[in-house]
Amino acid sequence: MSGRAPVADWASDFDPLDPRWIENPYPIWQELRQKCPIAHTDRFTGVYFPSRYEHVRAIAYDPEHFSSRRVFIREGRPPLAPAPPITSDPPAHRAERKVLLPAFTPAAIQKLEPRARALCRELLERLSGKDACDGTVDYAEEIPARLTARMLGISEDAGDLFRRWIHEFFELSMTDISIVPRVIGEVAAFFDEAIARCRKTQGDDLISYLIAARMDGEPLSNAHINGTLRLLLFAGVDTTWSAIAVSLWHLATHEDDRKRLVAEPDLLPTAIEELLRAYAPSTLAREVVKETEIGGCVFKEGEMVMLAYGAANRDPEAFPDAERVVIDRAETRHAAFGLGIHRCIGSTLARMEMRVALEEWLARFPDFVLAPGAEVKWSAGTVRGPRRLPLMLGPR
């Protein structure tokens, strides 16, 4: 990212790939919220950035003016690549989402918890006897990658492939759109093979479920299934491992919160909601398909909008003392899983993975801290989280 022109003014020339934004966007968002709550940049072919909860919410609930057909900003406009239902608008969206709902009920997710817990313990056992580790590489990113593979009915060893695709699709392709069709082609070929196998021998997995599903009485097309699987892979892995990793980062750098959760494990579900609020990893986009005005700002047709749910979650008009992490905060109606018709269908799964991952980690390493002199590397792009997280594991 070093070759990019430096930001001249955050209000009129913001850049989410600027090193200052990548390292710590919260002061920037706070400044924009006060001085220019809807910023704009000519970068990425023109993008608006609302930093207040009310504006993010208004856009998320307005598919007439803001289409979901493109949900990422990039330096250019690659061909549309449907991944239903996240890239769909009404009226198609409703039926496409409804098809998936039974696979993500609390009862369905509960069946995955034993494997999630066993997986976390396997990963922690690998760290037995060690004084240090990378909280992201050795733990956080492995959990949703492997659990998602299991849910789809494919080998958990596919995790390395998933991680490469995610890095290329979410980070590298922001400035090189030629990467997009290549990655989508590789993912499509991978899932075409998996779908073909499941058509021969259906099992108790999500691919088999989609093959058997009906929408308006008709089976889903192969292209529809493939696009949905790409969505579940991309949406379910990077966001969740980022949420787990940033939770570890927070607890490693906030001793009082870490000690309290160790002493009061029943507080963990409440703390998770607060960590999601404060460090929401996801930023999605909308394409302006009809000119409109919100908050005194005219949104021009053809440009894009960045919906940073983390910015909405730190709006003091929506959350008192919004910049402070309060792990026993009573009110947590956060937007970490999105707002409107596209609110994350996998939120129950993500919460379960976070809870189990943190329960098991704190039980094994209650005294962990950030390694002295550690350089934490944060991701650049659509999903924010630590990509390198050097930790000292403490006495055992």
Image (cartoon, rainbow, N blue to C red):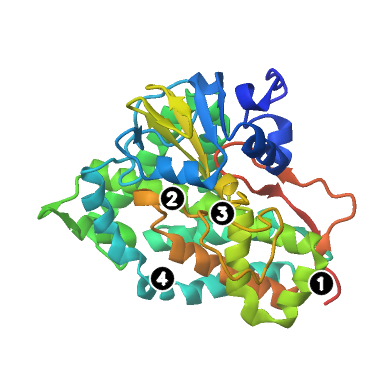
User: Dot 3: few (<14), some (14–19), or many (≥20) neighbours within 10 Å?
Assistant: some
Please report whichever mark, 2 or 1, sits nearer to the chain's N-terminal start. Answer: 2
Q: Position of residue 283 (x, y in %)?
A: 52, 42
Disc 2 secondary structure class: helix
Which numbered disc, 3 or 2, marks the residue closer to the eye? 3
Above/below status of 169 relative to 367? above
Mark 2 — residue?
A: 233
Q: Are marks 3 and 1 in contact (CB under 8 Å)?
A: no
Please report whichever mark, 4 or 1, sits nearer to the chain's N-terminal start. Answer: 4
State the separation of the CA atoms marked 4 and 3: 30 Å
Mark 1 — residue?
A: 367
Q: Residue at x 51, y 66 (%)?
A: 351
- Residue type at mark 4? Ile
Q: Position of residue 10 (x, y in %)?
A: 66, 27
Q: Residue at x 78, y 62 (%)?
A: 252
Position of 370 with respect to 344 (left or right) is: right
Quadrant occupied by the N terminus: top right
- Residue type at mark 1? Asp
State the separation of the CA atoms marked 3 and 2: 32 Å
Q: Which quarter of the figure has residue 322?
A: bottom right
Which numbered disc, 4 or 2, marks the residue closer to the eye? 4
Q: Residue at x 82, y 72 (%)?
A: 367
State the separation of the CA atoms marked 4 and 1: 30 Å
User: Dot 1: few (<14), some (14–19), or many (≥20) neighbours within 10 Å?
Assistant: some
Q: Are marks 4 and 3 in contact (CB under 8 Å)?
A: no
- Residue type at mark 2? Leu
Above/below status of 380 relative to 259? above
Mark 4 — residue?
A: 109
Disc 1 secondary structure class: loop
State the separation of the CA atoms marked 4 and 2: 16 Å
Q: Position of residue 226 (x, y in %)?
A: 31, 45
